[in-house]
Image: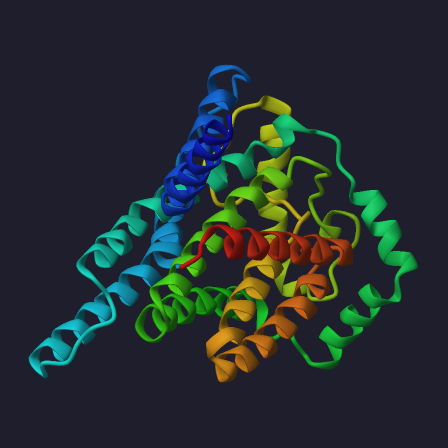
Amino acid sequence: MLEEIICKFVHLGNIKKKLQKNFEITFITGAIFSWIIGIKIWQLPIILPDKQSIGLLFYHYLLPLIYALMIQILIIVLRHLLKKPTKYKRGDLLIILGYIPLIFVTVILHFNFKAWMPLVNPVLFDNLYAKIDSLVPIASTLESLSVLLHLNTTGPALYHGLFVLMFFLSFIIHLSFDSFINFRKVVVGTCLILLLGSFSYWIAPAIGPFILKKPTLSSFSVYQGHMYSLYLSLKSTGIPPVGYFSNAPAAMPSLHIANSFFFLSMAKKNFPILNKIYFLFLGYIVIVAVGSGWHYFIDLIGGLLLSLIVINIIDKVIVE
């Protein structure tokens, strides 16, 4: 009897180790299965990227990893010529190469799940979140701060640019100068935030403050109006309009905050200077997120909680 119990525990331990070792395959398979269920059972549309969206997908998500991999290969070659050992094994590099299709599939699924929001749950919580903002002075303080710092002049380019820069810096620095286990956490955590975040949009969805009032930072208004018109078209017809793949509005939770805080937390472990830089980036993103009318203050809290959940998951699953 005792031997049977021990065998069961050993068996469960082996399963746990296999899940930890193949965690990327496990969660991306689950996400693909959810996508198939949405299409086959819920009759939700397949939303494919147009030419502009493919450019965004490549530049924002794939290029940082490709650059990181190219730099790491160069470092390995140089160390080999200098007859110095490298910290990465051949199997590690194969895993890193596998992260390119992993991120590609993750992003495709993320934008599909995000775009399905009005079809899965058409009930919006914008009025509730706006009421919370009116009761919490932090939102109005951030709006005033965005005006005081003249952030309207920088516009969407800097807001988006800093966010993309964090992907480049995190992927390159953690791959080149950190342990493989931490780099793996960066990639897996990024993918989990995108996937869990896109599912989270369905729980208590909102478009953003810009549909209720004129944003403090007006330079975002034209793009926001375009996104909202595409949203209304999908909601009324059920047919995804051209360009909706990367232009689906969704405020709760804020994945800008989720990803930014995640990168900041990962940098804190071994790169204190990068952590300080990210702290400034995150501060800017927080102010502009509210001042531009993209997000309610509660969206930022939702993004922070999502990031903390993902950090807890990867710390438990991805171990030495």
Residue 76: x and y, percent? Answer: 17, 72
Q: Nearer the viewer, residue 133 or 10?
A: 10
Q: Residue at x 56, y 41 (%)?
A: 198
Q: Residue at x 21, y 62 (%)?
A: 89
Residue 1: x and y, percent? Answer: 51, 25
Left or right of 257? Residue 105 is left
Can residue 222 be seen here? The reply is no
Residue 269: x and y, percent? Answer: 51, 74
Residue 186: x and y, percent? Answer: 44, 60
Figure coloring: rainbow
Give the vertical position of 229 relative to 277 (above or below): above
Q: Nearer the viewer, residue 37 or 241?
A: 37
Left or right of 138? Residue 53 is left
Left or right of 272? Residue 70 is left
Say which quadrant the C terminus sits in.
Answer: bottom left
Q: Residue at x 30, y 50 (%)?
A: 100
In this figure, what is the number of numbered marks? 0
Give the vertical position of 231 relative to 261 (above or below): above
Left or right of 204? Residue 23 is left
Can residue 56 be seen here? The reply is yes
Give the vertical position of 167 relative to 240 (above or below): below
Q: Residue at x 52, y 64 (%)?
A: 160
Give the vertical position of 130 relative to 257 (above or below): above
